[in-house]
Image: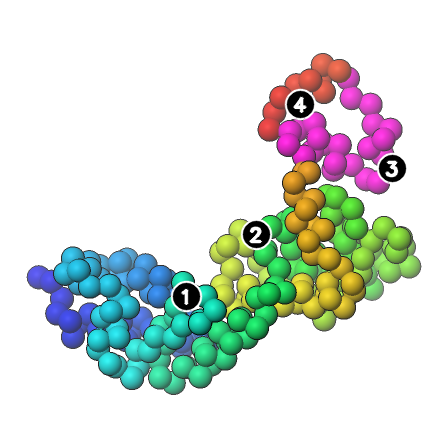
Amino acid sequence: MSPTTDEVLADLRRVVNEHYEKDSSPLLLSELGALLRKRNTWLSTESDGKKLRQVIEEAGDPDLVIVRDDTSPAYVAVTTGAAREIVEQYIRRRSQAKSVIPDLGALPRSVILAFCVRQENGKSVFLNKSFPFKYEIIDPTMADREQVLLIEDRYRRPGLKIGDSSELGPADRLDLQTKIAAWARDNGVKLEDFYTSQQNKPTNALERLIAAQPRGLAERIMIPADIALILSKHE
């Protein structure tokens, strides 16, 4: 038996409330739809030809509110009445920051990790200025400041788990992006330089092997021709 509209709305309220009891970041409309499909409570309404946003807007429920980012029509969130102000503030902050906020998907993984890795006592995190932009956790007195950039603690999120950057929650993603942007601004670093380098990243196993060597060693490394040939054919 298909759920009634009232039952669908009740389940909507439960899902939305559960989200904001645990997390103040916006619950996107697309995320809500995915959650409902997992619960098998949206299929019948969908078959009636109504979109999720239409159902919510027509209900006029004060605890089911649609909030949009006017500068990005595709960014639509659903919130409760109580959480509405926080979500609106988040979206305003996102709109103001996105012109300078870095694209995590375009940054090399080593750069992102430099802002999240845990450091040892008495040591600092440094990021190499040249490709492949490795990070180092070393005593500040040992750093070659001509070759590396210091990432001060105030710009970092130590312990933030980074698998795929697309899997980060909205709040963690924005916080990390904001910290990276602030670091780049305060240190006169052009994030575009990191993006551009992606075009020249190693394309096969041989190039990756050479790129992975410490500074100064790559020029001296000797690889037998037959091994080099094999590596060059493997992506």
Which numbered circle lies on residue 105? Answer: 2
With 145 as the anchor, is 88 left or right in this view?
left
> Which comes sooner in the sequence, label 1 or label 4?
1
Q: Position of residue 98 (x, y in %)?
A: 57, 66
- C-alpha span from label 3 to label 2: 30 Å
Residue in view at x 13 percent, y 66 percent: 3
The 10 Å Cα crowd at callout 2, few under 14, some 14 to 19, many 20 or more, is few
- Please state, as top left, top right, bottom left or bottom right, where the N terminus lies in the image: bottom left
Of marks 2 and 1, which one's residue comes earlier in the chain? 1
Label 4 crowd (10 A; few <14 / some 14-19 / many >=20):
some
Residue 11 appears in the rendering:
no
Mark 1 Cα within 10 Å, few/some/many (few <14, many 20+)? few
In magenta, the rendered stretch is 202-224
Question: Which of the two discs, 3 and 1, labels the residue nearer the N terminus?
Answer: 1
Identify which amino acid the numbered label 2 is placed on.
Answer: Gly
With 105 as the anchor, is 35 left or right in this view? left
The residues tagged by marks 3 and 1 sit, at their Cα atoms, a distance apart of 50 Å
Q: Which mark is residue 232?
A: 4
Pointer 4 and pointer 3: residues touching (CB < 8 Å)? no
Which residue bears the numbered disc 3?
Answer: 216
Kindly report the distance in space between the C-alpha atoms of the residues bearing marks 2 and 1.
Answer: 21 Å
Circle nearer the viewer, 2 or 1: 1
Query: Residue at left 64%, top 29%?
Result: 204
Of callouts 4 and 3, the N-terminal one: 3
Query: Quick one: which residue is furthest to the front in this view?
Result: 71
Question: If you read the primary sequence from the N terminus, does the residue marked by circle 4 or circle 2 appear first?
Answer: 2
Instruction: Indicate the secondary structure of the residue bearing disc 4.
Output: helix
Q: Label 4 vs label 2: CA separation?
A: 26 Å
| Callout 1 amino acid | Pro
| Front-lying residue, 144 or 97 | 97
